[in-house]
Image (cartoon, grey):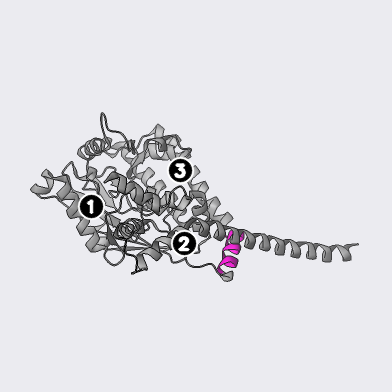
Amino acid sequence: MVFFLFPGLFFASYFGILSYILICIIFGAWIFHKFHNRTSSAASIVNSILTNKEIQNPELVRLCETFTPFIHSEPPISIISIIKRGLSFGFLFPFRFSLFFSSLVLFSLFAATFGRIIPPNPSKGGIYALSFRLCSFVLSFLSSLCLFACGMFKITHINPENKYKGDVPTIITNHTSFLDPFLLSVYLPLPSFIAKADVANYPIIGGMAKFFNSLFAKREEKGGKGISELISERQKSFKKGYQPLVIFPEGTTTNGNYLLKFKTGAFRSGLAVQPILIRYINNKSSPFFDTIPLHLHVIKLMLSWKTDVEIIYLPPYYPSKQEKENSEVYAENVYKLMLEKGKSFLSFSDADLTSKRQYQNLLSGKETLKDFLNKSKKNE
C-alpha cells in the first residue's frame, strides 16, 4: 500500500505544479492582452501621425503632440515575455503584493494609534519631537518595503550634498507615478502632500494622508480659500525642521519623459523652494499609470523584476525680488532650471490636464481625433 502511495503523491504533485505554472502563463498572456488593448491602439495612431511627414494638417499634428507626455510605451509581446510574466505572477507576485499591502496596513494602524495618542510635532519638543522622529523612521522603513515590493531595489542619489536639510518649506518635483510619495517619504521627514478632497475618504490611504497633515482641495474650488491660499498659509507657517510640503507643480502625472509647464500655486508665497527630479528606469514596465486601470498597472509593475530609480537633488532656490512679486516669473525660472538639469531624460511640453483627459477619452473610445478637431473649430 505504502509502495503505491508515494508514486501517486509524486505524480499528483508533479501534475499539480505543472497545472499551476500553466495557469500562471495563461494569466500572464491575459495581462498582456488587456494591457496592450488599452494602450497600443491609441499610441500607435498618435505615433503614426507624428512620424508621417506627408500629413498636412497642422492642427492634427499639434493635438497629437499634446498627447505624447501621456503615452504609455511598452515593448512588443513575445512568447518569452509572456512566460516570464506568467511565472512571476505565480511565484513573485503573491510575495510582493502581500508585502506591499501589509506595509500599508501596518502604517495605517500605527498612525491611527500611536500617531493620535502622541501627535508628531517637533516644535513642541519633548515627547512630541520624539514622536516625530519615530513616525518619520517608521514611515521611511515601511515606504522602503512598498518600493521593494514594486521591484525598486536600486535607488541612486545624484548630488547627495543637496539633500533636504529642513530649511525650506516646500519641495518641488516632477510627477510620474503613484509611487512618488512613497519614494519621497523614505528620504524626507514625514512630508505633507496635496490630495484631492475625496482621497480623505479612501480606506487606508485616506487615514495615512490625514496623518501626513496633507492639504485636501477640490480642483474646481473657486470660492473661499482656494488651493493656492491653502498652500501659501502652510508655507508661511513652516518651522525649520518640521514637515516639508511636497508639491507636484505640473498638476498631473506624465510618462516621465516630459516636464509640463508649472502652475503658480507653489510660488505665490514668494518663499524658497527646493527642486528635486525623479527618474524611473524600466524598459519593461513604466511606473506611469494614469492612462490605464490602476489595479492592472499595480499587477504589471509587481510582475516586472526591477525598476531602477534616480533622485537628482538641486540646491534650494531663493527667489529674487522680481520673482517674489511675480509668481509666474518665479514658476517659469524654476521650470527652466529643472528642465535644464533633467535634459538627459526630460523634454519640454505645454500639454496640461485637459490634454491628458482627451487622451484618456481616446484610449477608452469615448472620443476620436476627429471629435477633438471638430470641438476646437467650434471654439474658434
Q: Looking at this view, is 352 or 98 the one in front?
A: 352
| Residue 170 belongs to magenta span | no
Q: Which residue is mark 1?
A: 274
Q: Which residue is mark 2?
A: 285
**308 vs 333: above or below:** below
**Residue occupying the point 64% across, 61% down:** 26
Circle 1 packing at 10 Å, graded few (<14), some (14-19), many (20+), is many
| Residue 82 belongs to magenta span | yes
75 left or right of 209 in image: right
- In space, the residues marked 2 and 3 are separated at their CA atoms by 27 Å
Tell me which numbered mark, 3 or 1, is placed earlier along the sequence. 3
Mark 2 falls on what kind of element? loop
Q: Depth-wise, is mark 2 or mark 3 nearer the camera?
A: 2
Quarter of the image where one finds residue 288: bottom left
In the rendered image, the residue lying farthest to the left is 321
Disc number placed over residue 282 in the picture, else none:
none
Three-letter amino acid code of the residue under disc 3: Phe
Query: What kind of secondary structure does the magenta stretch mostly adopt?
Result: helix
Mark 3 falls on what kind of element? helix
Q: Looking at this view, is 2 or 21 the one in front?
A: 21
Q: Which residues are magenta?
A: 81-92
Disc number placed over residue 107 in the picture, else none:
3
Q: Looking at this view, is 72 or 375 the one in front?
A: 375
